[in-house]
Image (cartoon, grey):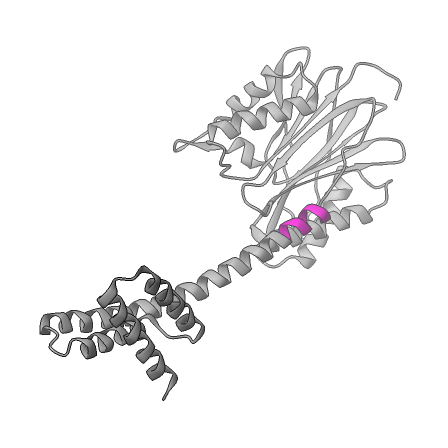
Amino acid sequence: MSSLQSDMQDYKDLLSKYLETKDEAILYQAEQFSKQSIQQNISPDEIVNVHYQALKEIYPDLHEQIEGSFKFLIETMISYGLAYQEHQVLREKQIELKSEIGVAANMQNTLLKTSVPKTHAIDIGVKSVPAKEMNGDYHHFIKDEQGNVGVAVADVIGKGIPAAFCMSMIKFAMESFSENQIYPQWILDSLNRVVSRNVEQGMFVTMFYGLYDVYTHQFYYASAGHEPCFILRNETKEFEEIDAKGLLLGVESAVKYEQLNTSIHEGDLIVLLTDGVTECRVDGRFIEQEEVLNIIKEHEHLNSQEIVEHVFKYFERLQDFQLRDDFTLVVMKRNSSLSV
């Protein structure tokens, strides 16, 4: 007797006993039958057919309308079985992909980890939170032998694993530069050549790079197509846009970037950010840039880390705790005159 015929006989016996006795214990045996069927890759329509054949043997005079309904159900279950198999395959692939993305996200966190430099000249706060598992934003700090602080804030145009690898490449390129070569123009010129040679076509990087001289309190900066950044002047309580323009990294290998500088006075705030802050979307509208700056101004009396935390919590609440885009904000406040 074939396996399916044997299963059919077992099923018929179970069904017959249950119809006679209504014994709940038989339902448990039916459950075991279904589990065995899964292990033997018996499709749902085959089980329905087994039920139909068993019922015909138990009740030879089965009403023709009942017979017709079973034929209808069998055809329905054939389509269901095929769709269910496809669903299971897709679900397994989705679980596998999610696992791989989780591993990649952990690798990204490890590879792109950077520490905030400690210096008496400036107080630094940073908050970078991905909207999804992979972060399309990037920030990095460098401190040279004299104690000067370099800071990069970047956004990769393109998301997911390719963007993560692109940012990893940029980080390792930056770490390979000499500590005596961290001026913004040189950094962006060098990174542009790296990105142009090594990143796939259609993927570009915006970056703002600044260098804070802790002795002269000059802030040197250059931009590669990045979001405007700002300085909140302590004396006037007004924001001043850091005016820097330049082509995105990776567009043209021979481009040269312009380096500018400005003086930073006691209590001044330098604000560096990505478009996840300035292009926060709520109720079908984009948050105005002025709203972002007003929140920063309201908390300027706090230390830099407290400022970025308050700003993040404000926009997180606005978006019902579901970020629409990656969020990166860096605040650097000049301390009162102290020996460095």
Q: Residue 117's spot in the image, x, y percent?
A: 80, 32
In this rendered view, identify the residue nearer to me: 256 or 151: 151
- The residue at 26%/75% (across/down) is 49
Q: Is residue 312 visible?
A: yes
Q: Residue 115's spot in the image, x, y percent?
A: 77, 37
Q: Is residue 68 magenta?
A: no
In this rendered view, identify the residue nearer to me: 217 or 297: 297
Q: Is residue 107 magenta?
A: yes
> On screen, 297 above or below 37?
above
- The residue at 54%/36% (across/down) is 276
The N terminus: image quadrant: bottom left
State the predominant SS element of the stretch in magenta. helix
Q: Residue 84's spot in the image, x, y percent?
A: 37, 65
In this rendered view, identify the residue nearer to me: 72 or 18: 18
What residue span does the magenta drawing correspond to?
A: 104-111
Q: Is residue 251 visible?
A: no
Would you identify the image quadrant in which residue 121 lies?
Answer: top right
Q: Residue 25's spot in the image, x, y percent?
A: 35, 62
> On screen, 250 above or below 130?
below
Question: In the shown orientation, is residue 300 left or right of residue 35?
Answer: right
- The residue at 28%/75% (across/down) is 12
> On screen, 14 above or below 265?
below
Number of numbered discs = 0
In this rendered view, identify the residue nearer to me: 55 or 189: 55
The C terminus: image quadrant: top right
Q: Residue reaching furthest top?
A: 235
Question: In the shown orientation, is residue 305 left or right of residue 150?
Answer: left
Would you identify the image quadrant in which residue 228 lies?
Answer: top right
